[in-house]
Image (cartoon, coloured by chain):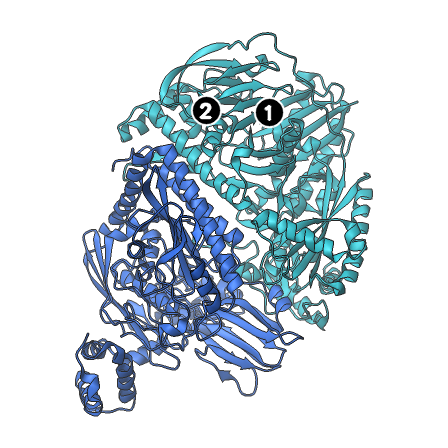
Chain colours: A blue, B cyan
Amino acid sequence: MKTDRLSLQILADYAAAAAEAMAYTLMRTAHSTFVKETEDFSCGLLTPDGVTFASPKTLGATWYIGLDYGPAIRLIEDYREGDVCITNDPYSGSVATHTPDIHIWKPVFVEGQLVCFVAGHIHNTDMGGAVPATLSRTLTEIQQEGLRIPPCKLLREGVFNEELLRLMAVNVRLPEQNWGDLNAQIASLAVGERKVKEIVARFGLQAFRDGIADLLDYAEAQARRIVAAIPDGDYEHSEFADEDSEGGPPCRIHITLRVRGDELVLDYTGSDPQLVSSLNMPTGGRERHVLVMVGLGYVLYSLDRSLTLNAGLLRVATAVLPVGTVVNPLPPAAVGMRSLTCSVTQVATLGVFAKALPERMPASPAAGMTIMNVRTMDRRGRPIMASIGPVGGGAGGEPAHDGMDGCGANSSFLKNTPVEINEAEVNVLFNGYGLARDSGGPGLRRGGAAVFMEFSVSAPQTMITARNRDRTRFGCWGLRGGGAGANSRFTRNPDGVAPEELGNRDVVLCQPGDVIRVTGPGAGGWGDAFARDPALVARDVAAGLVSEAQAEMGYGVVLRDGIVDAQATAGLRAVPRTAAALFDYGPGRAAFEVVWSAERYAVLTRLLAGTAVTWRHWVKKAIFTAVEAGEHGGASPGAQLEAIFADLIRRFPQLGGVAE
Amino acid sequence: MGIRVGVDIGGSFTDFAVLDEADGSVRALKVFSRPDQPGQEVMEGLRQLEARHGIPPSAISYFTHGTTVGVNAVIQRRGLRLGLITTEGFVDVLELARLKIADMYDLFSRRPDPLVPRERVFGIGGRIGPDGAELRAVDRASVLAALQRAQATGCEALVVSLLHSYRNPAHEQAVKAILAEAAPELPVFLSCETWPIIREYERTVTAVVGGYVQPRVAHYLTSLQQALKNAGVAPEPRITKSNGGVMAAEQGKADCIQMILSGTASGVIGAAFVARSAGLKKALSLDIGGTSADVALIIDGQPQYGVGETIGEFQIYIPSVSVSSIGEGGGSVAWVDSLGVLKVGPESAGSSPGPVCYGRGGQKPTVTDSFVACGLIGASELGYNAVRVDIVAARAAFATLAQKLGADIEPVAEAVQQICVSGMYTGISALVSRFGIDPREFTLIAFGGAGPMLAPMLARSLGMAEVLVPPTPGVLSALGGLVADLKNDFIRTIYSDLDAATVPVLQETLVALQAQGRAWLEGEGAAGDTLVTADMRYQGQSFEIEVPLQAAWIAAGNLAALREAFHDRHAALFGHADRKAAVQLINLRLVAQGDTPKPVLPRLPAADGEAVPSASIEAWLDGAMRRVPLHHRRDLRAGHAFPGPAVIAQDDCTTVVPPGCTVRVDELGNLRITVGERAA
């Protein structure tokens, strides 16, 4: 470390202040609701190589602490003072991860020398393409997801690239809003640039350069210390999204964590092939791409909250991302809804670390946060659209505490919208908004309860959209004897004569009188629920978070008029039970894995690797259909898949092509 | 002509500012606070006032008081055992809050437990719609059932917060009537009476915090009134409010929520008074105590107001003087992490045990100790002889730290000062960015025990040109209470597009607000006027900005003027305005304000000749051991000027002036420090 140990924190403070100043400028001046409501933006300071060394800690999205602009930066030939570069293309430079995210960066020169870059992104509401707001699970090719801008100059030495602006304006639905957001981003970079120059003036050029390197080294050293305390070994975990496309079979993310001393490998081999839907995560196969490292950042920071959050901490890990899989798709795979898959990779990461450190890790949080939107029309027939808020769940139970109810863990950054505002804005009337009873997984430490939202529709032709629906089939796992959380539900007219389960539907057309109820997934419990203090169970019952039935079944606690019946409780708890596995995945996943065991998946992964990337998703679905139909049912699981695959090749010889 | 007394109770000291109306002089007095027996410190101060300054209680003509009794009840969770009644289906309003959690990278992050746990929240039947229309009548049986459960769970009072009560309070009032009939002894607080704003969480949590502290505050005020009466203080005491105004103590008993931040607000009011009297257009106030630094923006002599100020672990949404709190102060502890990097805070030695140098049990080196270790503090007395500085102990604590780092004591102590300054820089930089101001145009007004010690260094790092240290920096909050106006806020939700159809509603609402404002002023027995503002936004935005309006525009139905006022304000705050876009008016607000007599501060006698330091000390400053002149504040006269390095000692604090800065004493006795570059 070249920087004086007395002054490293001072440089860290100044750099953080510069990043926060950029964030505040963005928030003050941006137009897009994504910036103001969900803080879906990032900003930071980058080394001349493009690695993020400072970002705001309490503002913006949580995914981008280690973002590497390097590949995009290197696609531009030369940099001059006043240049600003732009890209939103997930397939050039691996910085943007879906088209609505417009990233821009600017070189900072001092005395004619490039000292660093300042950069940031905003999620724009619309970038054009097949559907309004650009994103839909049903899209199958990146070309349907709007305008793509490969890395190029937005400003040359301070002068706008007018042709590019015109090109953008005619390709998007809300050009004024994008223009406003772009100006906000440029203003934010200007503030960052000015702040960096002030820091360099204060510390001197060489000390600034040394200091950046030291800040990254410091985060790395902290991270290595954390990792060194994790037992060496290989830890495997699979996590599933309910559907890999609308109505499709599950999407599997599989990670093998290899811990060796103070280094980690996150091997994603065994994850599903790339999909003909927009759930793919564009990483370019880069071994430290932020999308596959989000979970790791959460884990390391949670194990030691003094960890400095910059790209240095990612140096302890590399990811293996096989080409043509959902975690490293090739164009033209669509990527718009990568957030759903990214959420699954986060839980998968928690899963492998839970195997390595079950005493220190929480159970699964309520991954999968549905964003609800209502679209109706006003008197003049003009559309009114409002996001009425996220519906998710809480944090997993953890060694010291119950999981937080309603939010927390990896969804702590989201804000809700008040019921009173929603009712004033759109024609829906809420029947309830709160925590769902019996949703949190039972445990010594209970899993966080899910959120429910119920409203009735009062205008004709009301379109309800639910983005990122998941977890209606597979619950969130409990750990060390804790139970899985309850599944998510989405129902029309739940208390009517003919309730309609909507599952993971994205879009529902409603008519006056329709009642919609959405309940998020409950988080997993931690530790043996039968060892939970009966008084705490009684309190949860009094609070309405646990029913008396669940108290008996899940916790072995008998209540009489709200008071613990000690004798009956002791009796229930004395009944011998089978020893719990480390993970409880809940009934949905247990049933699925009876058929789709690790063994079957190993064979499936091998078979799919032998077919061309663009066929794989179709082949996967065909094999799932055949297994469900019981074809070659008498054979061993492996042999069955081989036989089904052979049938497919016979019928469609082109599937047996060589792997790319 | 009489004596005006302002009293401010802080964590360690209770400050008295005593203003003699005859000559405008301000005297300062400090006694130890008595958290065990709140109120006793006031009596002790009155005794000392008579004994030391010959001012009997009967001479006191005006008495103001700021207290942290409310905020402490929340921090220590020693308020009422409350129950909460909500609309059925929405009992989790406090549990869910607005979802977002501050430490968002931590899988184990937690929201503080609500002041009312879920098992004491009761839903009742009945519903008001967003337009204020009744959709279902209040279900009396469900109210009685809630009451029964509240009594069974030992609730001492109930807060009622029902959906859309900001629009139509009828259901909350009906519930109160039912409760009053069934349980006349049970206190009931309504959200529509506490602060009737749209957004159910914000309105509910504000009402809950208000109800939570109510008995403690009311009891405290009653004992204060009684004690003052017994002591022979004739005037009715006035209480400083979170909004920077004052109100009668009697009013405070009913409106506890209004005075919950009275301590922090009065410091800013004091600083604003100093800014006005010194003719400063743009100032930042900096109040550094043992555990935190409070920073506020003062423009044209006026503090800025906002909602969402933090009380313990909660935010409340009544209009308050806008203050940013940074968790670093003179008591912040310096330490070395496992990788050998020097850190400061977040742990604080606070006022107890305090820094090592106070010799009251503190063992860990603090920021204040770093100034002692450098020889900058300790050459003179501190804190009205209440504290003796133990230089040996402070240096010993730093020797341990220096050993871990393999460095000398003084450079390590200076690094601690710089880390503390860079931490505050980060906090102030956030404020600067949020308000979009340029700190280079601002003067830093430093007060509090540790403010003047750190302010010049901090101003230097922020690029600010000037620091002002008022004559009595230790009692500026107490002085703030003395100069505060009578002030009360009123609000009505409109939530409507700004078009012709809204005009009659605005006119009707304004008339009602003005009547309320005038009635309040009459109740306080004061003359004054009312100011109108509105919370407005572009259609589709999710937050509002407050826009000053003229009542005449509303009376005349001048929509164009109302819209233009909003566009201009938006442009001023955010740098752009969309003059074609539709505008919404969310709330109409009114401030009733009554003047209180303002003191005319005395002029300091002019200097004849140079300022003569009382000593020359050897101290470490800006990377070197230097000879530093030590001045006593009481020896300085108007027009005195001298360059840094210099140390200026006074009873309640020490001002440290680095090399490259210059000090000038102005006519009012303020130290005006021109900040220069750091010495190489």
Q: Where is residue B140 in the image (x, y as percent from the top left)?
A: 71, 70
Along the line of sight, the residue nearer the viewer: B114 or A425: A425
Q: Where is residue A357 in the image (x, y as percent from the top left)?
A: 27, 58
**Which comes before the other along the chain, label 2 or label 1?**
2
- Residue A236 lies in quadrant: bottom left
Element type at mark 1: loop
Q: Is residue A264 above or below residue B644?
A: below
Label 2 crowd (10 A; few <14 / some 14-19 / many >=20): many
- Quarter holding the N terminus of chain B is top right
Q: Is residue B617 above or below residue B575?
A: above
Q: Where is residue B559 in the image (x, y as percent from the top left)?
A: 74, 57
Label 1 crowd (10 A; few <14 / some 14-19 / many >=20): many
Q: In this view, does A363 lie to the left or right of B567?
A: left
Q: How far apart are the alpha carbons under marks 2 and 1?
A: 25 Å
- Residue A336 visible to an observer of this rendering: yes
- Residue A380 lies in quadrant: bottom right
Q: In this view, does A394 lie to the left or right of B82?
A: left
Element type at mark 2: helix
Confirm whether circles 2 and 1 share one chain.
Answer: yes
Q: Which amino acid does label 2 sit on?
A: Tyr
Callout 1: residue from which chain?
Answer: B
Callout 2: residue from which chain?
Answer: B
- Residue A218 lies in quadrant: top left
Q: In this view, does B435 lie to the left or right of A468?
A: right
Identify the residue position indicated by label 2 in the image.
B358
Q: In this view, does B279 lie above or below B239?
A: above
Identify the residue position indicated by label 1 in the image.
B470
Residue A475's tag is none
- Residue B195 visible to an observer of this rendering: no
Q: Which amino acid does label 1 sit on?
A: Pro
Residue drawn at (33%, 62%) of the image: A291
Q: Position of residue B116 (x, y in %)?
A: 57, 56
